[in-house]
Image: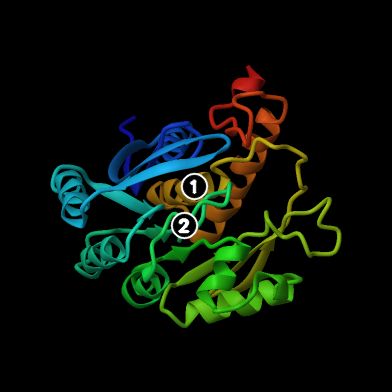
Amino acid sequence: MQPVTVLSIAGSDSGGGAGIQADLRTFAAFGVHGTTAITAITAQNTQGVFSVANAEPEMVIAQCLAVLEDFDVRAVKTGMLATPQTVEVVGELARSGVLANLVVDPVLVSSTGHSLMIEGGIQAYRESLFAFATLVTPNIREAAVLCDLDASTIRDCDDMVRVAQHILTFGPTYVLVKGGHFANQRDAGSHAPDVLVGPEGVTVFDAERVDSTNDHGTGCSLSAAVACGLALGRTLPDSTRDAKSFVLAAIKGAASWRLGQGRGPIDHLGWQDE
């Protein structure tokens, strides 16, 4: 069987937990061929991000074009785009119609609290990229920022639907608001709901909350897994359901790991089951 090809446009994580590294492991887990366009090099580990060197937007696009001209890319995901200029040039590429099944993970801040987007990036996402996305996948904090809200005002699934509908006004087909950071929700200690809003209406993907400090790269992995599903011909809702199950299993698999001294990686490849 010949694998299909997907493309990740994202940053590199030297600690191996998130970014391009997490995307490639996710692609491997789904049996698709992963290609990359690296937007930034980060010096980071499980405890934080210590330095960032952003790629020039022209180099990001050159990587994309090199891949697109040689491979039949069935789906594309974006992660850390780092600068408004890179968001804008990726948006121009998407406007040309060559970024199939585009999944946009609007990475703004790392899980350790380090800013991964410079000033102007939020406006660039809203004005230049979201309109070409099949799916946008913000977490609670990112969704709040994209809607000019305080994250503390998003208290339940109805609020998640409300912000998803607001983000839909920027043009994507679907929005998935992720509830992994949903500290204010009732029963937050046992549930981690994600809310998908799109043409079919509202779907809530609920799951148990796993007590683990090994959750670095979950957002990257989820968006990469959705892109895999789309590349394999699944519907967006089914791809999202599969991605949610994949990430949950990966968090469970790594719950007992002690890789690094901070927020560790997840078990993308099912090593714990072997």
Residue 259 seen in the figure: yes
- The picture quadrant where one finds residue 92 is bottom left
Foreground mark, 2 or 1, reads: 2
Residue at 44% of width from left, 72% of height from top?
173
Specify whether 257 is left or right of 6.
Answer: right
Residue at 73% of width from left, 56% of height from top?
206
Residue type pointed to by label 2? Val
The x, y position of residue 191, in whole percent, is 79, 54
**Residue bearing the label numbered 2:** 107
* Above or below, 213 relative to 176: above
Residue 197 seen in the figure: no
* Front-lying residue, 116 or 146: 116
The Cα atoms of the two marked residues, 2 and 1, are separated by 9 Å
**Residue bearing the label numbered 1:** 220
The x, y position of residue 238, in whole percent, is 55, 55
Q: Which mark is residue 139?
A: none
Badge 2 marks a residue whose secondary structure is loop
Of the two numbered discs 2 and 1 on the same chain, state the one appearing first in sequence: 2
* Front-lying residue, 173 or 111: 111
Instruction: Tell me the quarter of the image containing the N terminus.
Output: top left
Residue at 15% of width from left, 50% of height from top?
62
Instruction: Tell how many labels.
Output: 2
- The picture quadrant where one finds residue 274 is top right
Residue at 20% of width from left, 53% of height from top?
56
The x, y position of residue 182, in whole percent, is 72, 60
* Front-lying residue, 126 or 40: 40
Colour approach in the figure: rainbow
Badge 1 marks a residue whose secondary structure is helix
Q: Residue furthest front?
A: 50
Proximity of marks 2 and 1: CB atoms separated by less than 8 Å? yes
- The picture quadrant where one finds residue 218 is top right
